Amino acid sequence: MVTESRELVKSLMEAKESIISGDVKRGVEIIEKTVNSSNIKEANWVICNVIDAADCAYVVETLNAIGKIFDVTACGNLKRVISCFMRAGKDSEFVDLALSALVQKRREDQLDKILAETGEIPAPLLLKLASAYGKIGNRKKEQELLKQACEKGLKEACRDINQIFPRIT
């Protein structure tokens, strides 16, 4: 059992290093061969390490390839998951998972950092951030982000502004 655990760690370290160095395909292949239902909990740290250490493009590629087998909400750097997908201009279920976990943990400070650190945010992601702020209770920030999404042409955001703040529009 100890030998199996050591071999698992060794393989996952190799996979992590491959992904961080840009060989995502090789890293993903190693993880797919190594991780199974009996060791997934023991292996979850590898996705958290990739999220922390890899370039954003590699984070997005890795999560899209194998993210579903891991519990990304257990990772400490959920902000980076959201930021990486925003920088890539892509929406993802991983953004939804990370936002939900931040809302559940009441981490408005992390939402603020995402806004501060991310340049141009696509309208659909602005809508998701607005919803997260709303769930935390920051109606002012929710309104501000809905307005930005509306100005970018997202009709759903315009509708949401009218429903949430009928006196403002």
Image (spheres, rainbow, N blue to C red):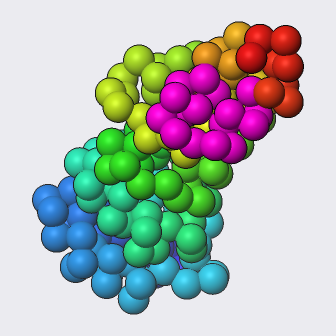
Q: In this view, does 67 lie to the left or right of 54?
A: right
Query: 113 or 75: which is nearer to us?
Result: 113
> Is residue 72 magenta-colored?
no
Q: Indicate the quadrant where residue 146 lies.
A: top right
**In the image, is residue 140 above or below residue 125?**
above
Q: In the rendered view, does 77 fall on the left or right side of 106? A: left
Magenta span includes 149: yes
Can residue 145 be seen from the camera position used here? yes
- Residue under the image location 52 percent in, 58 percent down: 92
Q: Give the range drawn in magenta.
A: 146-161
Q: In this view, does 160 lie above or below 155?
A: above
Front residue of 24/3: it is: 24
Q: Report x, y in % for residue 6.
A: 39, 71
Q: Closest to the observer: 169 or 102?
A: 169
- Residue displayed at 63% across by 82% down: 38
Residue drawn 23% across and 48% down? 55
Q: Within the image, what quadrant is residue 14 found in?
A: bottom left
The image position of residue 129, as x and y in percent, is 61, 33
Counting from the top left corner in percent of width and height, residue 69 is at: 57, 73
User: In the image, 87: left or right of 90?
Assistant: left
Residue visible at 58% across and 32% down in the picture: 150
Q: Main secondary structure of the magenta part?
A: helix
Residue at the farthest bottom position = 33
Residue 169 in percent (x, y) is at: 74, 17
